């Protein structure tokens, strides 16, 4: 469905809010004609802003303005459709992926990440993911083939781009069993 459009992970989007963003990532973002921000990334950013408000209201307000300006741009916003929910539901019930969504109460991490939601969106819309942390997506790809995962800071494809020009070539999204 999507040609030459990357689905941004939260860490890529967050780079643009930093006082000194990663220069290679910033240059890569400027070169992109079109990028997409999934609902899951907006949720992670909004959660981060709300959390920051408790400890630093001024910084939270600065981030709020940044996010509001960002949402007024011409980014693509792929919808969280029933098809995305179906794939996400399968991922959430896949034991090898439990660590990606189950919160460990003893850990310091307060909230689960949204990598599975991002991955499901990537599959449905045939958009490769741009991220600075490829590890979790590599794990997902072993069971649910992703259409590509790219690290712009390194300029490398952790998971090569798979192109589906028509529905006959689409990869089945059912889990691939691995030993």
Image: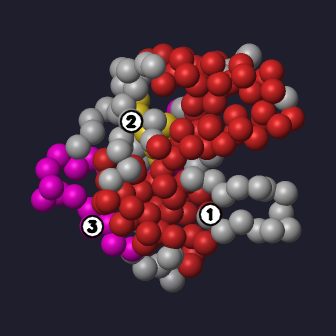
Identify the mark nearer the N-term, 2 or 1.
2
Between 37 and 150, the residue placed more toward the observer is 37
Label 1 crowd bin: few (<14), some (14–19), many (20+), radius 10 Å: some
Give the SS element for disc 2.
Answer: loop
Q: Which residue is mark 2?
A: 77
Residue 100: image tag: 1
Percent from the top left, x then y, of residue 112?
66, 58
In the image, which residues are magenta? 153-175
Q: Residue at x 61, y 43 (%)?
A: 44
Q: Residue at x 33, y 72 (%)?
A: 174
Give the SS element for disc 3.
Answer: loop
Q: Quadrant of residue 90?
A: bottom left
Task: Check residue 172 for magenta coloring.
Answer: yes
- Indicate whether 86 appears above or below 22: below
Percent from the top left, x then y, of residue 124?
32, 53
Q: Is residue 141 visible?
A: yes
- Indicate whether 84 appears above or below 74: below
Task: Check residue 82 for magenta coloring.
Answer: no
Identify the mark nearer the N-term, 1 or 3.
1
Give the SS element for disc 1.
Answer: helix
């Amino acid at each position: 469905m999507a040609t030459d459009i990357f689905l941004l992970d939260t860490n890529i989007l967050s780079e643009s809010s930093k006082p000194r963003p990663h220069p290679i990532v910033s240059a890569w973002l400027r070169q992109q004609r079109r990028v997409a921000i999934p609902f899951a990334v907006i949720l992670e950013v909004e959660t981060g802003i709300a959390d920051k408000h408790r400890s630093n209201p001024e910084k939270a307000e600065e981030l709020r303005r940044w996010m509001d300006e960002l949402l007024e741009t011409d980014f693509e916003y792929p919808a969280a459709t029933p098809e995305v929910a179906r794939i996400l539901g399968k991922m959430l019930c896949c034991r090898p992926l439990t660590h990606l969504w189950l919160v460990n109460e003893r850990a310091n991490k307060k909230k689960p990440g949204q990598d599975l939601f991002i991955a499901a969106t990537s599959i449905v819309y045939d958009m490769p993911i741009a991220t600075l942390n490829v590890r979790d997506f590599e794990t997902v790809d072993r069971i649910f083939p992703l259409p590509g995962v790219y690290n712009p800071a390194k300029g490398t494809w952790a998971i090569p781009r798979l192109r589906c020009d028509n529905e006959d070539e689409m990869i089945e999204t059912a889990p691939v069993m691995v030993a």
